[in-house]
Amino acid sequence: MTILVTGGLGFIGSHTVVELMEQGRDCVIIDNLSKSTLNVVDRIEAVVQKKVPFLKVEMLDKIALREVFKAYNISSVIHFAGYKSVGESVKQPLLYYQNNLISTINLLEIMQEFDVKKLVFSSSATVYGDAHLPPLKEGLALSAPNPYGRTKLMLEEILRDFVAANTEWSIALMRYFNPIGAHKSGLLGEMPYGTPNNLMPHLLNAASGETEKLQIFGGDYNTEDGSCIRDFIHIMDLADGHVKALQYVEEDFGCEAFNLGTGVGYSVLNLIHTFEAVTATKIPYEIVDRRDGDIVISIADVEKATTVLGWKAKYRLKDMCIDSWRWYQTVKGYTI
């Protein structure tokens, strides 16, 4: 039986494929390559020492998606595919609503057609909005501050409605916090397509001298050092969480949401100083004006994932920094 991984060449998808294959699971990856590159397939294969089937598929094309299900004996799906830039979503909301919503609806319809009823869905902690005090629990009221977040929130609601009408289905909604790090081999990591949306790629560019300074948005928040606080989680812990969620949906029914984080918050300046300490590399930075829409403190309550999935984050912040730096040096061709 084969697991279909949509968006499997992205940062989280590619590491999850590695985790699945290292546990002996068969996978097929689909990706439209709009936010990723084909050489990620080679990197995955270099890590796992196996071939991995890949198909370039646009999920808005139901005919192409149906052909994947015809070609492979798919038993379950982990769905990562979707646009994820907050800024881009504000500028092009229709693009995000069309791509993220319609592609997922297409997937559900094709899964139903082929009697595939197990799905792990990539959601986001952004569905909590900014009205709650941390730590954030799965049962809180949801809201989203931007079109990207609203697509995740809408899809969660669609998936809940779908399972309510189809009780033999099982879907896990994975709300993860701030993934950083890379595979310990240095062969696989975050490879932003165009201008990075996340903090770590900008930090790495500043550490290497590729950019002059790292910009920190806001230094006057009501936190210990004035910078925002985030729940950073190692990408391999996140991948493991998806594998545990897959095992859960394979054995259970219904629709459940799970936070994936460490349950510990670190400020942006904490991250910088930890990186400097464990890599002996100075990061030039400057504090600039606050950025619209940024939440001050975002920390996960991970009790549900620990209790129900048997999952818990293992890696520490220093591991995330070391592995990120190893990956950056490898991909840039530096001497490690």
Image: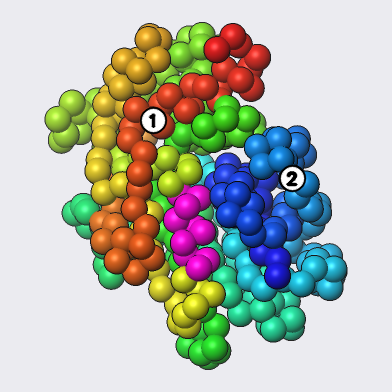
Q: Quadrant of residue 105?
A: bottom right
Percent x, y of residue 220? 20, 28
Residue 124 is situated, as x and y percent measured from the top left of the image, at 44, 55
Position in image of residue 152 (x %, y %): 49, 62
- Residue 167 appears in the figure: yes
- Residue highlighted by disc 1: 319
Q: How many marks?
A: 2
Give the residues in magenta: 238-247
Provide the secondary structure element on which disc 2 rests: loop
Q: Main secondary structure of the magenta part?
A: helix
CA neighbours of label 1 inside 10 A, class few (<14), some (14 to 19), many (20+): some
Q: Quadrant of the N terminus?
A: bottom right
Q: Residues within 10 Å of mark 2 (few under 14, many from 20)?
A: few
The answer to whether 207 is drawn above or below residue 294 in the figure is above
Q: To which residue does mark 2 refer?
A: 50
The amino acid pointed to by label 1 is Asp
Of the pair 190 and 310, the residue shown nearer to us: 310
Query: Which quadrant, please, contains the C terminus?
Result: top right
Mark 1 and mark 2 in contact (Cβ < 8 Å)? no
Within the magenta stretch, is there residue 108? no
Q: Please, what secondary structure does the residue beneath circle 1 have? A: helix
Eyeballing the image, is 246 above or below 55?
below
Residue located 50% across and 50% down the image: 239
Residue sitting at x 74%, y 45% = 50
Question: Viewer-proximal residue, 164 or 293?
Answer: 164
| Mark closest to the chain's N terminus, 2 or 1 | 2
Q: CA distance from mark 2 to mark 1?
A: 26 Å
Disc 2 marks a residue whose amino acid type is Lys
The structure residue drawn at horizontal position 47% and vertical position 42%, both measured from the top left corner, is 235
User: Which residue does the image show at 22% across and 54% down from the upper left?
Assistant: 135
Q: Nearer the viewer, mark 2 or mark 1?
A: 2
Return the mark for residue 204.
none
